[in-house]
Image (cartoon, helix red, strand yellow):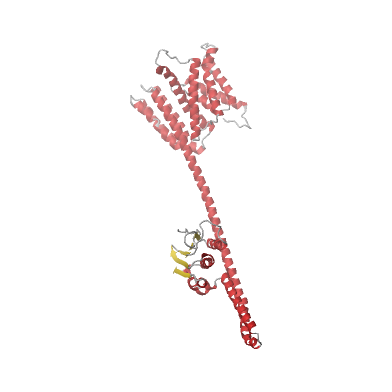
Amino acid sequence: MHASPHHPPARWLYSVLIIAYLSLWLLLRMAEQPYWILPFGLRLGVLLITPPRVWPWLFCGELLVATGQHYSYHTPWHQLALTYLPEPALMMACVYIGRRSGIESSLDRPETAVRLLLLTMATVIVTTIGSTLLNGSMSIDANAPWIERLAPICRAMLGSYIGALLVVPALIMGFGTPAPRAELSALLRNSLLLMLPYLVSLAILMMLPAPLPQFARILSLAPVLFFAFSHGWRGACLTLILSSLDIALASQFGQGAEVTANSQLFLAVTGTGALMLGTASDALRHSGQFVAEQNHRLAAANQQLDQLARELRHAARGNLHSEEQQRRYLAAELHDELGQNLAAIQTHVQLARFRLQQAGLQDIGTAMHSILSQMRKSLHHVLNNLHPAVLDEFGLYRALADGPIRELLQVAHVAYLPELHGDPESLDDEARVALYRIAQESATNTVKHAYATEFRLTLRVRHHGGSTIAVMDIRDNGIGMPAEGPRQGRGLQGMHDRITAIGGRFRLYPGGDGAHLRVLLRIDPDTDEPPSLPD
């Protein structure tokens, strides 16, 4: 019934709605009982879900209907005005203030439901007390104790509040926030299968002699709580109406089963609790659905990220392989061309040294031989940097134990303590080259910067679950690295990038006595996830 601000309903539609409201209001007035005043709830619900510009027409329509009812009694106009004007006017004022304060006609969230119930209670109190003071509709004995004087007012408040509990949620469910078709079908189906047989049994109990009727009234509210938990506030609303009708019919046709104020107070408290429970259940269910949707989106995003990470690792591994192949090719070309030419030149110089000596040019021959030897050493160093040929010749373990790394450390007077365990043959070329490069770069850093006297290298290769695990641990006893300092140099960053490119883990432990780094590789064609590096 909420109108769009851009496309307001036609006037004929408002006329039809007003006529339908007045007809239902008149019908409920005829079926009104002392302990549930349904016309009060109908008026409150309609005011909550209709725009304020319609309210004067509703107000005038109610007054005309009331006038028609009392026409045969020749009731004076001023008496009719004092009887029927205060309650609608006070209710409209309360609802208008509540809507201006931001209270919504919705039970979808617990905080909204609490505010709406508070507005309902405030409206009940204001309208009941205000209309009682203005029209004096209740006969109160001035000589009676004050508790007995308040009893009629309290009963009227209780009846109005129960009427609101029975009608307002139903109007909100029908016109304010309709339920999805599937949810409404499930609610109606469960109500027919579970609720109706239950209510028939309770109605029979309430027609029996005491104390079974009182027990049946209390028991009739059990399905309200059950439906509130399973179907939310809509389930609580529907079952609360059915339970109340069951109590009313049994009270009407039963023997001595009249409805007492205590049972209606219990109905009011339980109905309020059921609506709050239903609202909380709906909020919890919607929250669970939202979390499930978010988890689904996060899972999809994680899958995309995993796929992207695998593609990046494959690309990085491919780039590393291409770079190593290019290095191998350049090393082979330099060795075959430049290395052989330098060796040939050095041989010719060696052969010509006797002639130079006879010509008195011995110093020139010696200098040329020295320069060529230095050039061959430099070329050998360049070739080793481009591609460690010692890996191809002797394998990983012998290259680490007796290769250029040992020579470098011995020249710097650093004790070299390698510990090599396991079989490295299951490692692929990229892994062997990466491990050797890490050891080579670490030894170079130790010689240049650490002022160390000892360099320890431990490498363990083992098989686990079809995978090959390689763990390299490197330490020295030098000055170490500061725990907080400048960013890593190009050498350390290059080591990290090289290991990451082949799906490994690289960790540097700064501080303490000496430098300490650890590398973990897992070679498994069926697994793209990087391994976890232990502390």
In the rendering, at what x and y percent does residue 359 appear? 66, 87
Q: Is residue 431 in view?
A: no
Residue drawn at x 62%, y 82% as measured from the top left = 366
Q: Is residue 223 above or below residue 310?
A: above
Residue closer to the observer: 364 or 235: 364
As drawn, which residue projects farthest toward the bottom?
A: 358
In the rendering, at what x and y percent does residue 125 appear? 48, 23
In the rendering, at what x and y percent does residue 502 appear? 53, 62
Q: Is residue 280 above or below residue 264?
A: below
Residue closer to the observer: 398 or 149: 398
Q: Is residue 208 in view?
A: yes
Residue drawn at x 56%, y 21% as measured from the top left = 59
In the rendering, at what x and y percent does residue 52 appear? 58, 26
Residue drawn at x 41%, y 27% as measured from the top left = 267
How many marks the image carries: the answer is 0
Is residue 251 shown left or right of residue 76? left
